[in-house]
């Protein structure tokens, strides 16, 4: 089984502050790793978290910030668990999934969800990784972001329910 991290849980994992939320998600991850679960850090989630933290560093006029520490922790995590880079087949599948979700919807249609891009790419990465053989669970903080029909091998769950 693989757990692929969405940007929300990934951001919580690399948050340098010691608080109940960061302790809970780190404990959750350690428990799964100890049980042989494999974690994937998808390039698209790395991008989402990294761009936000870099912007925070650039906007901090007083020198190094917690975002600089978060970037360090993101790099450490990237070196520790499997990094899943974007590939052409993944992007082609993401384009197909995106179009299927948009089919038949007009601008302003309540079924037309504006927040599809990164989550569709992450979903395509999960589908590609599963190859219809391996169980892949997308760990997220918000299931509404994952607007796909689960496959027999790919599902999305709130991270704390996995």
Image (cartoon, rainbow, N blue to C red):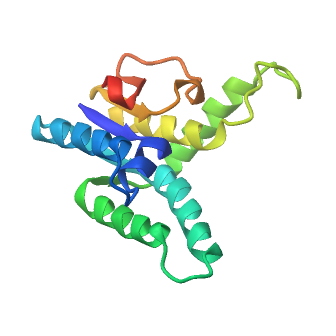
* Residue 55 shows up from this direction: yes
Instruction: Tell me the residue at 57%/63% (across/down).
Output: 51
Residue most extreme to the right? 107
Residue 6, horizontal then vertical, whole percent? 46, 41
Residue toward you, 42 or 58: 58
The picture quadrant where one finds residue 34 is top left
Question: x, y (%) of residue 23?
Answer: 28, 45
Could you say which is closer to the camera, residue 159 or residue 64? Answer: 64
Question: Where residue 9 sits in the image (x, y, percent)?
Answer: 42, 42
* 113 with respect to 21 (left or right): right
* Residue at 53%, 83% in the rendered image: 63
Residue 30 at what x, y percent from top left? 18, 43
> Is 55 on the left or on the right of 37, as rendered?
right
Above or below: residue 58 compared with residue 154: below
Residue 86 visible here: no
Q: Residue at x 27, y 29 (%)?
A: 134
Q: Is residue 52 left or right of residue 134?
A: right
Among the 4 quarters of the image, the one containing residue 105: top right
Label count reads 0
- Look at the image and tell me in which quarter the N terminus lies: top left
Question: Could you say which is closer to the camera, residue 68 or residue 98?
Answer: 68
**Is 15 situated above or below 143?**
below
| For residue 47, above or below residue 27 | below
Does 71 sit left or right of 105 as displayed? left
């Amino acid at each position: 089984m693989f757990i692929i991290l969405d940007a929300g849980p990934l951001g919580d994992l690399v948050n340098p502050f010691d608080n109940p939320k960061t302790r809970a998600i780190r404990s959750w991850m350690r428990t799964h790793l100890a049980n042989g679960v494999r974690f994937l850090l998808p390039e698209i989630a790395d991008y989402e978290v990294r761009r936000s933290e870099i912007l925070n560093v650039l906007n901090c006029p007083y020198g190094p910030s917690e975002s600089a520490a978060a970037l360090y922790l993101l790099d450490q995590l990237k070196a520790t668990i499997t990094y899943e880079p974007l590939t052409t087949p993944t992007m082609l599948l993401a384009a197909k999934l995106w179009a299927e979700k948009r089919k038949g919807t007009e601008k302003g249609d309540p079924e037309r969800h504006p927040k599809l891009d990164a989550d569709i790419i992450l979903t395509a990465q999960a589908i590609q990784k599963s190859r219809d053989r391996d169980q892949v669970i997308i760990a997220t903080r918000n299931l509404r972001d994952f607007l796909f029909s689960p496959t027999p091998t790919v599902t999305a769950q709130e991270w704390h329910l996995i």
